[in-house]
Amino acid sequence: MKITITEIRGTKELRKFIKFPFKLFKDSQYWVPPLNADEMQTLHPDKNPAFDYCQARYWMVYKDNRPAGRIAAILNTRANEKWGYKHLRFGWVDFIDDLEVSKALFGEVEKWAQELGMDTVDGPLGFTDMDNEGMLVDGFDKMPTIANIYNYPYYPEHLERLGYIKGEDWLQFKFNASQPVPDKVNRLNEIIMRKYNLHVKKFKSAKEIKPYGRMFFQTLNKAFVNLYGFVELTDKEIDRYFKSYFGLIKPEIVCMVFDEHNEMIAFGISMPTLSKAFQKAKGRLFPFGFIHILRALRKYEEIDLYMNGVRPDWQKKGVASIYYAELNKAYIRLGIKTAISNQQLESNHDAISMWNNYESEPYLRRRLYIKKLK
C-alpha cells in the first residue's frame, strides 16, 4: 500500500478536490451533493471575499495512485483576534475508511498549524458561519438538509483515534409542521408584542423581501455574535450571500420581527427541502439540474428552518417564540407536513428549549472536534 499526499494548487486541481466526494458517496442514499459552482466560489481565493482575512490550504491523499481523501485548513485571523485564541480550522474533510489516509490528512493540517504558531485545530468549520459546520455523529440513516454535512459513521471514529475530542455539538429537530400553535404560546406572544410594541412582517413576493436583505444580514451579525467561532460578515460577504441565497427564498415562509422604530430584531427564514432535488442535480445546475431544483421550489410538503436569530439585546424576552409561531401558522395554511430545524448549539439552552412547546423529536447531531497541539 502506497500513501502519497498532494497539496492542491490552481483551479484545475481544485476541481478534483471538489469532485472527490462524488466518488466516495456514490452509493449513499443520504449524501446531498453541493453545487460544484458554489464550492468553487467558496474555495477559490479569487472568488470568496473571506480571503481578505483568511488563508487556506488544501490537500488530497492518494492510496496506490487513487484518490482516497481530502481536507482543507483555514486560518481565520479575524476569528482568532476576536476570540483571543490560536486556532486553525479544518473543513471539507472526506476520506476512505483507512486510518493511514486520515492520519496523513490531519498530519498536514497539524503541521501547518504549528508552523503558523497555532496551538489548536478545530472543525469541521468553514471560512464563515454560512459555510457547513460539524461532523455527523448521530442520524446517519436520515436525510440531511442542503446546509449540512453528511459523512459515514467511521469518520468520528477516526478523529477520536487521532486524538480529537468533543468541543461543541449542534442539534437538529424534526417536528410535525401541521400541528397547531399551542394556545399558551399564542397568549404569551400577544403579551410580548403589546409589552414591547413589536410587529411582524410577512411577505407575498421576493420583491417585498429584497429591500430588507442588508438589514437581515446586519441583524444576523448581531444575533450570532456570541456563537462559537462566529465573526461578523463583511460588506463584501453580505453582497455575496445576498446574491446566493435570497433568490431561493420563498416569501410565504419567511417572518421578520421589528421594534417600534422599525428596526429588525429577529428573523425566521424557512426554505423548501431541496435535498432530493440536489441529489438529482448531482452537483450541476446545467443542463438539467436546475429543473429539479425549480420543481422542488414550486411544490413542497417539507421545509427546512434555514436560519433564525434574535438580536442580543432582545434575547431572553420570548421574541423567538413570535416568529416560530407565525411560521407555524404559515406551514398549516400551505399544507406543509414536516419541518427540520436548523443547527442549534447544544449549549444554546434558550434556543433548544423552544422545542419543548411543540411535538418534536431529535433528528441529527453534529460535532465540532478539537485537538490541542503539543
Image: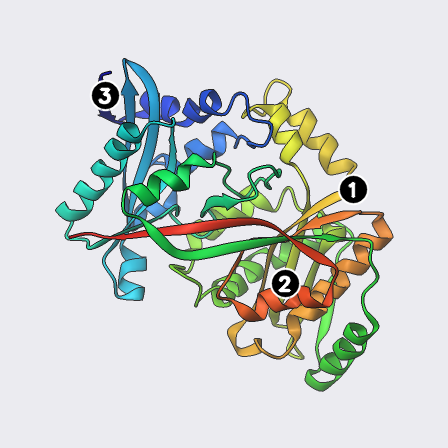
Can residue 124 be seen in the rendering of this structure? yes
Query: Which residue does the numbered mark 3 point to in the structure image?
Result: 3
For this rendering, which residue is in front, 233 or 112?
112
Amino acid type indicated by mark 2? Phe
| Residue marked by disc 1 | 301
279 lies left or right of 250: left
Q: Quadrant of residue 195?
A: bottom right
Q: Mark 1 and 3 residues: CB-CB less than 8 Å, in contact?
A: no
Q: Is residue 24 left or right of residue 89?
A: right
- Amino acid of disc 1: Glu
Q: Disc count in the image?
A: 3
Q: Measuring 54% from the left and 65% from the top, which residue is drawn there?
A: 219
Amino acid identity at mark 3: Ile
The residues bearing labels 2 and 1 have C-alpha atoms spaced at a distance of 22 Å
Circle 1 SS class: loop
- Residue at image x 76%, y 79%? 188
- Any part of residue 132 in sight: no
Mark 2 → mark 3, Cα distance in angstroms: 48 Å
Say if 134 sits above or below 318 in the image: above
* Label 1 CA crowd tier, 10 Å (few <14, some 14–19, many 20+): some
Q: Which residue is mark 2?
A: 267
Q: Nearer the viewer, mark 1 or mark 3?
A: 3
